Image: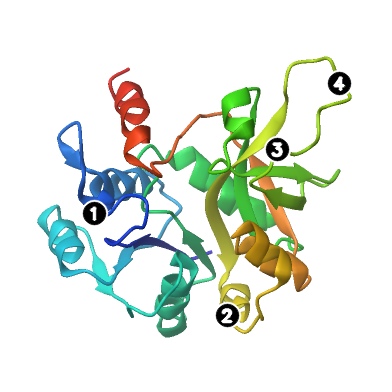
Amino acid sequence: MRVLAVIPARYESTRYPGKPLIDLAGKSMIRRVYEGVENSNLISKIIVATDDQRIVDEVASFGGEAAMTGAHHVNGTGRCVELASSLDSFDLVINVQGDEPLIRSEQLDALIHSFQDNSVDISTLAIASSCETDFLNKNRIKVVLDEQSNALYFSRSPIPNQSKTKNSVSFYKHIGIYAFRREILLETQNMEPCALELSESLEQLRWMYHGKKIRVVETYTETPNIDSPEDVDKVLRLLNT
């Protein structure tokens, strides 16, 4: 399978403007994401998709490839669709969020391997967690699974409800990296928004609402993303270990 990795990177982030270019122990965040993806031998091509020339220039400075995409996109999936629409030689497209500086090649490889099951159209990552702070944090997305490891629901709220158990909290924390069969990715852009998506502000609920299953691949490596300036210290600590 030929695999295209797209790294959407938006400069004007609401919570953290300019974050793709922040310095993380001597390298920009977008460079750390790019280099993490480069470590996968299963990925055929990597493109940073952005609407800001400063990010294009940064990617060029370390020898990466970037493409300017429309400023109208409301999320990274739209940028992935724009690129995938004109690149029809790829079987799979992976949307690697530009705020995942600790992404590991084995995580990407696991997503790609999930498509050996012909029933899989979309796959994503999650990690088992017992961190109560993350369980209660609306910026840490939770997911519950069925017996085939397909997602039943994603939420910013604490799910599953644990008020009836005396054990320590236990849940799956979603890692927002998605892999799609190319034709399924293109199909998502014709799906109308749904109430669940708008309520949770989670686009994957739109795909599920319209009948697409999402296979959840469990990872055992903690790779925290950077949503806000408060997340930087945790990432720096992990980079220095």
Residue matched to label 1: 18
- The amino acid beneath tag 1 is Gly
Crowdedness of circle 1 by 10 Å Cα count: few (<14), some, many (20+)? some
The quarter of the displayed image where residue 128 is located: top right
The residue that appears at 45% across and 77% down in the rendered structure is 84
Residue 121, visible in the rendered structure: no
- In x, y percent, where is residue 47? 32, 65
Neighbor class of circle 3 (other Cα within 10 Å; few <14, some 14-19, many 20+) is many
Taking 91 as reference, is 26 left or right? left
**Sequence-wise, which precedes: disc 3 or disc 1?**
1
Q: Nearer the viewer, residue 142 or 127?
A: 142
From mark 1 to mark 4, how far is it between C-alphas? 42 Å
Q: Please state if 103 lies on the left or on the right of 53 as rendered.
A: right
Cα separation, mark 2 vs mark 4, equals 41 Å
Q: Which residue is mark 4?
A: 165
The earlier-in-sequence mark between 1 and 2 is 1
Label 4: element kind: loop
Check disc 3 and report the residue beneath it.
158
